[in-house]
Image: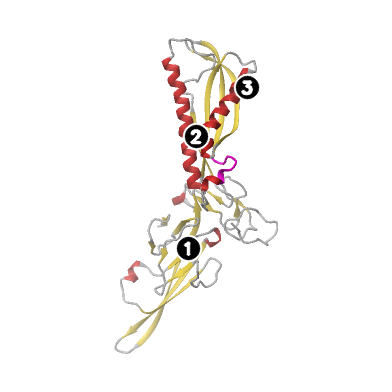
Amino acid sequence: VMRTWVLLPAVLWCLTGEKIYVKLHQNSPVLICMDFKLSKKEIVDPTYLWIGPNEKTLTGNNRINITKTGQLMVKDFLEPLSGLYTCTLSYKIVKAETQEEKTVKKRYDFMVFAYREPDYSYQMAVRFTTKSCIGRYNDAFFRMLKKILDNLISDLSCHVIEPSYKCHSVEIPEHGLIHELFIAFQVNPFAPGWKGACNGSVDCEDITNHNILQARNRIEEFFWSQAYIFYHNFNKTLPAMHFVDHSLQVVRLDSCRPGFGKDDGLHSNCASCCVVCSPATFSPDVGVICQTCVSVLIYGAKSCPTSNKNQPYED
């Protein structure tokens, strides 16, 4: 049975087919070079040999911590640290009466992947009535609405992008034919200067995602207030251009940073995560798919080289 962990337990025993997901710039869980059953037994002269993703022997340094009992932890996890970690445990079985020794070796594999949270944005759509589909006032209203929404969320380093509208004639039962503006736009957390909101944080999607949620809430409240005005002025003369109640639609869009993507099949237990692109794949933009490229030899590739000479990833 395949088991997967997303940096919840502090200590991980090796399980068959295990995949481990470590958030970018966080410490990995402690990997144990032993199975749980063996840990309950007495072990004579144990030695531990860790091999990293580059197939080189791992030794303790400022990033990789290996204890005398074979426990491994990787600090400040980055894309190139992803891959297969293998530990070989060697120990002796000694027959007390004859002092005969037998060496036993066991191998434990851990597949470790860097991941990061997706970046959120919101696609929104609303409708407003209008006097006619002909005339400059529709353009003026559209520009004014965008300006209002941008002002609502500018302190959150968010902005409105890809705004558009079309005017349609809509026949409504008991109201006849009316004209409506069908307006669509995206709320995006990367307004100019957005990195200033990170406060020096290396990994900023937690902050930008928090900000975009606040921006979404403010915009929703703005349109709900338009509906409130509509209901409380029902017996009065309404302006020709007013919000169509219940017309607001909001859909969250996820994107991954270059070098990361989503794969429900390969990473089913971290399906909502943006997982580092594996060798033979790359992601050049903020999409959610790692594309195939057989010449890629590293984790976290942002481009597809034309030759086999692939440079190590640099953050």
SS at mark 1 in the image: loop
x and y, in percent, of residue 142 in the image: 59, 24
Task: Name the residue type under label 3.
Answer: Asp
Q: Residue at x 48, y 12 (%)?
A: 173
SS at mark 3 in the image: helix
Local crowd size for mark 1, using a 10 Å CA cut-off: few (<14), some (14–19), many (≥20)? some
Single out the residue that lies furthest toward the right: 306
Foreground disc of the pair 2, 3: 3
Task: Name the residue type under label 1.
Answer: Lys
Single out the residue that lies furthest toward the left: 97
x and y, in percent, of residue 154 in the image: 54, 36
Task: Name the residue type under label 2.
Answer: Val
Give the residue pinned by disc 1: 75
Q: Which mark is residue 251?
A: 2
The magenta-colored residue range is 189-195
- Looking at marks 2 and 3 on the same chain, the residue that comes earlier in the sequence is marked by 3
Question: Depth check: 260 or 78 in front?
Answer: 78
The quarter of the displayed image where residue 164 is located: top right
The span from disc 2 to disc 1 (Cα, nearest Å) is 36 Å
Contact, CB < 8 Å: mark 3 with mark 1?
Answer: no
Contact, CB < 8 Å: mark 2 with mark 1?
Answer: no
Q: Which residue is drawn at 60% across and 23% down?
A: 166
Say if the magenta span includes residue 129: no
Give the residue pinned by disc 3: 139
